Image (cartoon, rainbow, N blue to C red):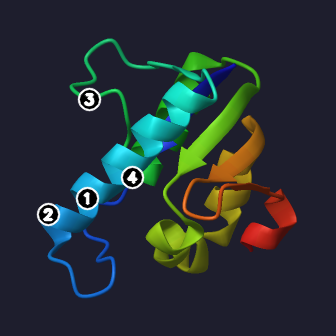
Amino acid sequence: MRGIVLLNPHYKIGDLHTDESFAIQKIMTDKHLEEKNISPVILNPYQIHPYYTIPHELLLNLQNKKTGQIDCLVLHSLETIERFIYIYPEKWLQLCGYFKEIISVAAQTPVKKYEAN
């Protein structure tokens, strides 16, 4: 299975500092990738990290690569990108169209695209 990870460096988990929250997001998504044998997809050869932190950049890279559908988009939780979903619902739907499923690691269950609106 192939997937792309999207993390939010500005999201705070509970009362934790954003740096700690981001570290938890990385640890949980990395663990999930390993457990489910998901290979990270690198769309941009100049990408520094094997994950994205900017949804707009991810969408742009997907549009430019013309990759077709990728197995999954892995998120810590929908809460990490709810602001993006609220402000840019049409871009979220476009983004979802590139993936067979959206996986929220914190819930450990696949999220259907219509639930993410």
Determine the CA span between mark 4 and mark 1.
8 Å
- Asked whether disc 1 touches disc 2, contact meaning CB atoms under 8 Å apart, the reply is yes
Labels 4 & 2 near each other (Cβ < 8 A): no
Q: According to the image, label 4 marks what residue? A: 7
Q: Mark 1 or mark 3: which comes first in sequence?
A: 1
| Residue displayed at 73% across by 37% down | 99
Which mark sits nearer the N-terminus, 4 or 3?
Answer: 4
- On the image, the x and y values in percent for residue 117 come to 74, 74
Q: Are marks 4 and 1 in contact (CB under 8 Å)?
A: yes
Q: With respect to residue 111, does 117 lie above or below? A: below
Can residue 53 be seen in this snapshot? Answer: no
Tell which tag, 1 or 3, sits nearer the viewer.
1
Query: In x, y percent, where is residue 14?
Result: 32, 85
Q: Which residue is mark 2?
A: 19
Q: Which residue is mark 1?
A: 22
Circle 3 sits on which residue? Answer: 49
| Residue 79 in view | yes
Viewer-nearest residue: 72 or 98: 72
Q: Give the Cα distance between marks 1 and 3.
A: 13 Å
